[in-house]
């Protein structure tokens, strides 16, 4: 499993070297955008609309818009200094809580944690302590230049880190429009709804659920491929080599150029011919 981050967990005075591995795999069917005419993949370029020219990455800086058209430029080095000051490679455990105290709306992404180097014993200690106490740890971690709030818990004998949103990142439910203040339903309707819920209630078994739409899309793609319903991208013609072209043109000119006429030699006049004139 690919390692995407290496660092350590700070658990009191205990330091646990760990690696992070993505626990979630995105299986969306990904399509390329093609030019309808020639089926060539579209190229996305970074272009300055004012200068009308394509930019190289070294020509691009970060700017925060403070007002319409006004920006504050922040250098990468300045961000790096802040990141280093926050402990970029450290997971700081700050609290322990009951997992059911966190509403699922806060959860973001999941990562498996594995021990690194000599951290096997300390890893096992934290896993056992969390299991027996039925607690989860609240921690902070820097990932991709962003400070993340996270929950560390045990899942199938493996430590899992769940990044969670900060409170100011979760929008207020009270701002959702048209939510009725009171339920305008009868007791009979409520009883019927509860009866339906009871009939459909079961034990959660994730293996029984699948992405039916994705399966249909993959079946469609497979059917088109087997039916040879394929298109080929038009290959770009190689650019002519200017140096070779100019050399060929010059050689052609040299080969077809008429030979230069030599000036006629003047005939010497003898003494006898001069006397006869």
Image (cartoon, grey):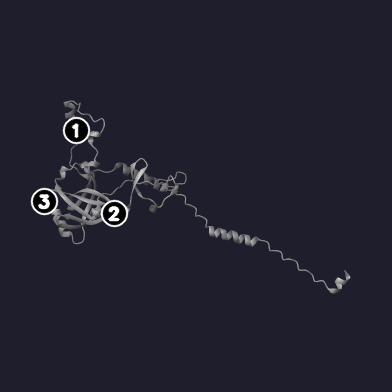
Q: In this figure, which residue is indicated by the disc labeled 2?
A: 80
Q: Tell me residue 120's x, y (percent).
A: 17, 59
Q: In this figure, which residue is indicated by the disc labeled 3?
A: 132
Assess whether mark 1 and mark 3 are in contact (beta carbons under 8 angstroms): no
Please report whichever mark, 1 or 2, sits nearer to the chain's N-terminal start.
Answer: 2
At horizontal 23% and vertical 41% (from top left) the residue drawn is 168
167 and 271: which one is in front? Answer: 271
| Residue placed furthest toward the bottom | 271
At label 1, counting other C-alpha atoms closer than 10 Å, the crowd grade (few under 14, some 14-19, many 20 or more) is: few
Q: Tell me residue 93's x, y (percent).
A: 17, 51
Q: Tell me residue 121's x, y (percent).
A: 15, 59
Q: In this figure, which residue is indicated by the disc labeled 1?
A: 196
At label 2, counting other C-alpha atoms closer than 10 Å, the crowd grade (few under 14, some 14-19, many 20 or more) is: few
Left or right of 224 on screen, residue 243 = right
Q: Tell me residue 251's x, y (percent).
A: 60, 61
SS of the residue at dot 3? helix
């Amino acid at each position: 499993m690919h390692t995407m981050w290496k660092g350590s967990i700070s658990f009191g005075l205990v330091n646990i070297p760990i690696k992070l591995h993505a626990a979630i795999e995105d299986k969306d069917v990904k399509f390329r955008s093609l030019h309808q005419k020639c089926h060539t993949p579209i190229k996305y370029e970074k272009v300055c609309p004012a200068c009308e020219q394509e930019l190289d990455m070294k020509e691009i800086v970060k700017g925060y818009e403070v007002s319409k058209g006004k920006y504050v430029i922040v250098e990468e080095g300045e961000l790096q200094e802040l990141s280093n000051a926050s402990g970029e490679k450290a997971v700081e455990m700050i609290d322990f809580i009951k997992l059911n105290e966190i509403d699922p709306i806060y959860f973001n992404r999941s990562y498996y944690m594995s021990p690194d180097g000599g951290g096997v014993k300390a890893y096992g200690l934290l896993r056992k302590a969390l299991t027996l106490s039925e607690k989860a740890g609240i921690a902070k971690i820097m990932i991709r230049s962003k400070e993340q709030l996270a929950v560390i818990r045990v899942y199938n004998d493996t430590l899992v880190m769940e990044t969670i949103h900060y409170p100011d990142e979760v929008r207020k439910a009270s701002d959702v429009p048209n939510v009725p203040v009171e339920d305008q339903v009868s007791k009979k309707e409520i009883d019927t709804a509860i009866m339906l819920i009871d009939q459909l209630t079961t034990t959660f078994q994730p293996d029984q659920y699948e992405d039916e739409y994705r399966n249909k899309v993959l079946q469609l793609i497979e059917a088109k491929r087997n039916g040879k319903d394929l298109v080929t991208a038009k290959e770009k013609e190689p650019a002519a080599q200017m140096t070779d072209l100019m050399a060929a043109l010059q050689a052609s000119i040299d080969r077809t150029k008429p030979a230069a006429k030599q000036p006629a030699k003047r005939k010497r006049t003898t003494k006898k011919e001069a006397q006869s004139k």
